Image (cartoon, helix red, strand yellow):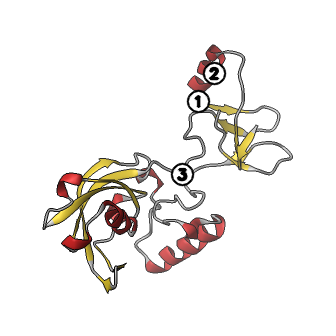
Amino acid sequence: MQIGPGTFVVRFPNPRAVAQICYVGKITLKTSGAVIHVTKWSSAVGAKGVMEIAWVKISNIPLDKRSNRNLAYVASLVDVPLEVDAATLHRPASVGVRIGCRNVEEIPAVAEPVLGDHFYDFFYEVDQILVRDPNREKKVVQASSNPREKNMEMKNSLLSTPGANLGSFSTGLGGKSPCIPRGKIGPYSGVTGECGI
């Protein structure tokens, strides 16, 4: 059954057959020459990456506007709020919030939202990183030091990876990564990609 572009789920007769084919990992079909990458099924099949999680200190929040709802709003300005540290909710210096994001290093230092009837500058400081995406470093596109070559590489990458401009170009999470080799799945399908089992 196809669950995505170039990704299929296949049922095997028993767990031993699954263990054998996953041990090999990569299979080349004799009839078409297609290369199939095999992995054991999990709920993360087809995921673009692991959500990175960090505790972030947020400062310059007025004491009279501190509540779980307002803190969730302030944290959502940079990414997904997961938890507010209740022990720091009324601490004058800063409030701790656990945030989930694609890349902890891209959390901005300052955001300017409206809270109530006033504009504020809220300051964000990463306090502790809990989860990192282990594959993010492998997906970084190496840019050339020559500016002209760098511009040509970026144009070629954007043309060859539809949807890449929707996400972060440096991680390749916004579209198909040009670093991953892909082959045809079937002789008539014309679909390229990896297979997950």
Where is mark 1, residue-wise? 40
User: Please, which residue is most extreme toward the front here?
Assistant: 64
Q: Quick check: 112 above or below 90?
A: below
Where is mark 3, residue-wise? 48
Please give left or right for residue 171 compared with residue 12 in the image.
Answer: left
Residue 8, horizontal then vertical, whole percent = 71, 39
Q: Quick check: 157 above or below 24?
A: below
Residue in the image at 34% along x and 68% along y:
74
Query: Closer to the N terminus: mark 3 or mark 1?
Result: 1
Image quarter of the C terminus: top right
Foreground residue among 53 and 94: 94
How many angstroms separate mark 3 from mark 2 (CA)? Answer: 24 Å
Residue in the image at 54% along x and 72% along y:
154
Residue 6, horizontal then vertical, whole percent = 71, 46
How many angstroms separate mark 2 from mark 1 (CA)? Answer: 7 Å
Please give left or right for residue 59 compared with residue 15 in the image.
Answer: left
Tell me, yes or no, whether the two marked residues, 2 and 1, touch with CB atoms within 8 Å: yes
Disc 2 residue type? Val
Where is mark 2, residue-wise? 18
How many angstroms separate mark 3 from mark 1 (CA)? Answer: 17 Å
Residue 27, horizontal then vertical, whole percent = 67, 31
Disc 1 residue type? Lys
Disc 3 residue type? Lys
Q: Which mark is residue 83?
A: none
Residue 61, horizontal then vertical, whole percent = 23, 72
Alpha-carbon neighbours of circle 2 within 10 Å: few (<14), some, or many (≥20)?
A: some
Alpha-carbon neighbours of circle 3 within 10 Å: few (<14), some, or many (≥20)?
A: some
